[in-house]
Amino acid sequence: MSVTLDDALLVLLGRGPSSAYELWHEHARVLGAARRVDIGRVMAAVSRLERGGLVRVEAPHEVRTGSSNRRPCELTAAGRGRQAAWLCAVTPDTEVEDVYVRGMLAVVAADGETFAAFVEHALAATRLRIGRLGRIAAEEPAGRAGVAFDQEVARALALWLNQLPEHRAPASRAEKLTG
């Protein structure tokens, strides 16, 4: 699967500034216990993203006293660009699980324009996948059953992607400020 913690955190930061601790909780809430990561990995990912210029972390002397000394971080313009590019980088060969994770992240945290672009790209890729599967002619019963299964999964994915806008989270803090 091509979903990295760095990419997931970039999407979650689309909601607005958050500390590593808050990102850790949000990651678990959105993606579930099966995909839970250690807080140390989240902190290391935030440091990598900061070194890469994708995230800006509030300096220690600026930290608010009411935040339990948690340093908020936020997306830079480069981070927002990478977030959008990663969400929309869906091809017919992208694993269904990967599309699901991107969709779950996008539905709660991507800005409206990026969310719409993700859905559009993912639907186009899924339609191409369905078309490719329709051209596969397997001769063995197990092969035919496998193709039939893959077709049903792809159709279900397309249905889910079409319904995803109905599950969209309210506008992010950033959208409310700029919208």
Image (spheres, grey):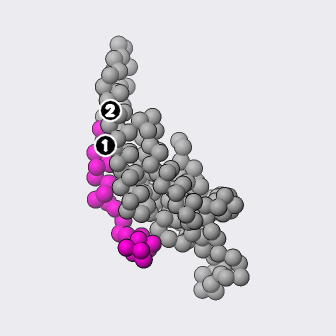
Q: Residue at x 65, y 75 (%)?
A: 58
Residue furthest toward the bottom? 65
Q: Is label 2 in contact with label 1 (beta carbons under 8 Å)?
A: yes
Q: Residue at x 36, y 50 (%)?
A: 119
Q: Which residue is mark 1?
A: 158
Marked residue nearer the N-terminal end (2 or 1): 2
Q: Position of residue 169 (x, y in %)?
A: 36, 65
**Which image quadrant is residue 141 in?**
top left
The residue closer to the viewer here, 154 or 132, is 132
Q: Is 119 on the left or on the right of 79, as rendered?
A: left
Residue type at mark 1 is: Ala
Residue type at mark 2 is: Ile
Q: Is 46 on the left or on the right of 35, as rendered?
A: right
Callout 1: 10 Å neighbours few (<14), some, many (20+)?
Answer: many
Q: Position of residue 79 (x, y in %)?
A: 56, 60
Q: Which residue is mark 2?
A: 130
Magenta segment: does it hold 171?
Answer: yes
Q: Which residues are magenta?
A: 155-179
Q: Quadrant of the C terminus?
A: bottom left
- Residue 114 badge: none
